[in-house]
Structures are given as structure tokens and as C-alpha cells.
Amino acid sequence: MGDLLLLLVVFLATFLVGGLLILRIPPRLHTPLMSMTNAVSGITVLGAMLLFTKAIPGWWLSVAALAIVAGAFNLVGGFTVTDRMLGFFQKRGTHDE
Amino acid sequence: MYSSVIVPLVYLLAAALFIFGLKNMSHPRTAVRGNLMGAMGMLIAVLVTVLDPERVQTYYFVLGGIVVGSVVGAVLALKIQMTAMPQLVGLFNGFGGGASVLVAGAELARTAGGQVNPYVMLTATALSGLIGAVTFWGSMVAFGKLQELQMFKKPFPIPAQQLINALLALVLLVTALAMVWGAGNYAVLCYILIVLLASVLGVFLVNPIGGADMPVVIALLNSYSGLAAAATGFVIDNNVLIIAGSLVGASGLILTKIMCKAMNRSLGNVLFGVLEAGSLAGSADEMYATVRSTSADDIAMLLDGAQRVVFVPGYGMAVAQAQHAVRDLGQLIEERGGVVEYAIHPVAGRMPGHMNVLLAEADVDYEQLKEMDEINPTMETVDVVIVLGANDVVNPLARTDPKSPIAGMPIIDVDKARTVIVVKRSLSPGFAGIPNPLFAMENTLMFFSDGQKAILDVVAAMKEL
């Protein structure tokens, strides 16, 4: 039970820290913020990969493989498109200085 | 040694990179680095997991899956047009939620009946399946709506939708309780039922929501995908999933709240409410009796002498792909000594910050992009406002008519500027379905035209002056 408590504390503490950081982000960057955090939620790909370390009944293996595809799609696509978007913001920001 | 020391340490480092990455997202200059830090965190976490010696036996599956997902995701991300950004974000988001459903399900199938702490694990699994499935299907419907696919143009007519949703939620709750109480018996069956019911619920929840409310839905689904990932973290007892998921959940929730506030509506009202027709509906013809229209040449003359010009873009600018033309016109005005700014309403477009990205893509300097609260106090000193593809967010009824469905919604006070030019195809109402008295005001001129053509015509007329 101690473990659960620790995990809950981690969850809540991160929620608060994350919230404080996000409140400082100006509206003009809200789309990149959303698409970057969206990519971060692809972290479940780790969970999918860890399934392969364990004995797992037959066809659930393909479920895990599908999860890897979906997670990788989410995170690689998300980070790439965010980088592309932010490039537009930076382009002007730098050569004006 | 490897899995008990190195892996946790690298996971911790990854979590730190996510947090610092987010911190760097607060300024356009550092945001690229912030995004890279996030990607780095993800990369090291994935690498340290792949390199775990225990995993060698099933390398193909893991690597194959990563390659397929990454290539498809990267190609889409690089090829897609910036105007299609809201639906792409929705699509990625959905797949994140979908991955959570699959992981939690597979883990359940593996351990059913034999977990150390069945109640916690089963509760987390049920949550993961529920939130993940709602995220996936909700995002798919949102994608269909944003992409304007034919079958999503109108909501599917579902009788007594609220009642059905409530029933679905109730059955979901009972199934989840049965799954947890059963402590392993029929757990997989219950889980599949939860996922199926939640899938229907996800479709039903997003189905009735219209275009202008999309920013709220997209932000909320974003939050859900994080919460699903965090729930999966509880299922497999993994800190980095919990931290990453929690960050995303917090971010999406805050964005949702900001979007709701910008519409002066509660989240419940956006999700379940129906916009009621305003008190002035029906009297539109009378209201529009004094509308004056104008031409590209007249607008060019006006702009030629203007000291301060403000563009107010809305979703219509995105539809007409007019952002590049707008940038050209802005530069022409600047060359003639005018100051050009862009006033962005928080819910303009189809996702939070949508207009900013489009204008940044068109090379507009981000210093010229002003927030509503920043520009409103100085609106009286603006010579010309050009409203392009926006309607409800500049409707003065929000301030003056307490019975209006948009009463109290913060708006950009364009009516206080010296001259307002509204570029619009017709006098048709916006999303809220109410007439806009702005169009008939003394200082307003209507330019009836397609958004992009209108701006290009004005550019041509200005060059001839």
C-alpha cells in the first residue's frame, strides 16, 4: 500500500508542478504546447515495450505490438510536427534581433 | 544491476527532461529547445528499455512496431498543411489514448488473478480502458469533424442523447465495480466490455459538438490522453508514465479551462448544453437595414492613410487559406508607415492558439500577435480594423444583451475602432446563430467576398495607388 501512496504523491506533485509551468505559457504558444504534451502522452509506448519482457498469452502479443505502433506514431509524429510549428515562430524571432 | 539501477535512473532523467522541456515552452525563442528536450527524454527512455538484455527474444516486434509507427507519424507530420493542424493533433492524440487501452488490456490478460495488489491494479486498468477508449473514439470523431468528412458534417441524430450517455456511464461504473470486486474473475471480459461501452460513449460525447466549440474538446481530449497514460503507469507500476501522463493531464485541463473562460461558458455547458437562439433572432433584416458595403479600392485608400491597423482573424481565414495574403497586405501597410497588429481571440479557430500558428507560418513576427486583453484598452486609437473570417468573437451583443447566448463572453472590442472593415461572404450568422449588430454600425463597412480574394484585391488596389 505504501507504494500506491508514493505513486499517488508523484502523480499529484507532477500535476501541480506541471500546472504552474503551463500557466506561464503565453496563448500564442498554446498550439505547440498542446502538440508537444500530446507527443509526451505517447510515453505508453514504454509500457507496451515492457510487455515483451514477460510471458504473455499468444494473441495479446499482437495487441502489445499494435500498442507500440500507436504509441510510436503518437510520439514521433507529435514531436516532429511541434518542431515544424515552432520553426515558424523562431524564424522571425531570431533575424529580427 | 541494469534493470534495478540504470533503468530507473534513466527514467528519472527522462521525467526531468519532460518537466524542463515544458518550462522552456514558455517563450518562442526557447520553445524549440523545450520540444527537443521532451523528444530527448522520450528517446533515452525508449533506448534504455530496448537495450534491456531481457528483451532480446522479441526484438523484431518491438523494433518493427517502433519503425512502422515512427515512419507513418513523421511523414504525416512533415507533409501536412498547417491549416490541417487541428485534425492532425486530434489524430495523434487519439492514438496515444488507444495505446493506453491496449497496454492496460495486455497487462491485465497477462496477470489476471495473480497480481500483488489486485484492487489497485484493477481500478487503474479499468480507468485506463475507460479514459483511453473515450480519448481514441472521441478524437476520431473530432478528426472527422475537423477534416469535414461528409459523414460528420451533421451530428448523427441520436434520440435522448443525454439519457443514453447517462445510462452508458452508469453501466460503465457497474462493470468497473464488478471488475474490481471480482478480483480477477472475468476481469478480461469486464475490461473488454468497458472498452466497448467507453468507445460508444466517446463517439456520443463528441458527436453533438459544433465547430466553434472544438478548441475546448481538443484540449479536453489532450488532457484525457495524459490521464489514460498515467492510469496505465499505475497499472504497470511505472513512475515515468505517471509523471508524463500527469503533466499532459494538467496541461490539457488548464487549456480547457482557459478556452471555457474565453467563451464565458462552463465545461458542462460546452459538452452537454445547447446554445439557445438569442432574443434578437428573427429581427436580423431590420438590424441589417443600414449595412454599408465597400470595395477593394476604397479599402486601399483608407489603409493608405491609416496609422494603426489591426487584423482580427478567425477560422474563416484558415478556411480561405488567406494568411499569406494577409501578411503581404500587412507589409504593404507598414511600408507606407502604418503600424500593423493582429488581435487574436483565445478561441479563434479550431484549437487553442490556432491563429498564431497560421500567422507564424506566414512569416508574421510574433511580436505583432496581440492578445485580446492587450489590444482592447487601446482600441479607440486604432484607425482601421479588418475582421477576417471572425464573427461571434467581435459581436458587441456579448457586452450589451444579457439575454444573448453569448452574453458575457469576452470579445475583441472592434466596434470602438474608428473604422471597421468586415470581410465576409454574406451577412449569415456565426456559430452562435445570432445576428451581429457590428455589421450595421456607422463605422463599419462590409466587404462581401471570399477571404483570400478580398485581401488579394486590396493588395492589388494598394499597389496601384
Image (tube, coloured by chain):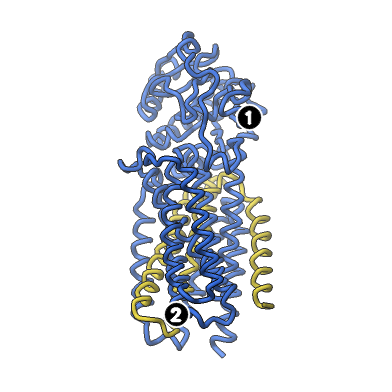
Chain colours: A yellow, B blue
Element carrying mark 1: loop
Residue B374: quadrant of the picture: top right
Q: Which three-letter amino acid code belongs to the residue tagged 2?
A: Arg
In the depicted structure, whether residue B44 falls above or below residue B277: below
Place of residue B69 in the rendered image (x, y in percent of width and height, measured from the top left)? 36, 66
The C terminus of chain B appears in which quarter of the rendering? top left
- List x then y, in percent, for residue B345: 56, 35
Residue B171 is situated, as x and y percent measured from the top left of the image, at 49, 57
How far is mark 1 from mark 2, CA to CA? 53 Å
In-front residue for pair B405/B92: B405
Which of the two residues, B381 or B42, is positioned nearer the viewer here? Answer: B42
| Residue positioned 67% across, 77% down in the render | A1
User: Which image quadrant is residue B25 in?
Assistant: bottom right
* Disc 1: CA contacts within 10 A as few (<14), some (14-19) or many (>=20): some
* Horizontal arrangement in the rendering, residue B79 relative to residue B30 (left or right): left
What chain is tagged by disc 2? B
Labels in figure, total: 2
Between B421 and B125, the one nearer to me in the picture: B125
Viewer-nearest of discs 1 and 2: 2
Look at mark 2 in the image and give the residue it sits on.
B110
Q: Which mark is residue B169?
A: none
Amino acid type at mark 1: Gly
Quadrant of the image containing the N terminus of chain B: bottom right
- Whether labels 1 and 2 share one chain: yes
Q: Which residue is mark 1?
A: B408
The residue tagged with tag 2: helix, strand or loop? helix
Q: Residues within 10 Å of mark 2 (few under 14, many from 20)?
A: some
Could you tell me which chain the residue with mark 1 belongs to?
A: B
Q: Tell which circle, 1 or 2, labels the residue nearer the N-terminal end.
A: 2
Q: Is residue B363 visible?
A: no
What residue is drawn where x is 61% and y is 50%?
Answer: B254
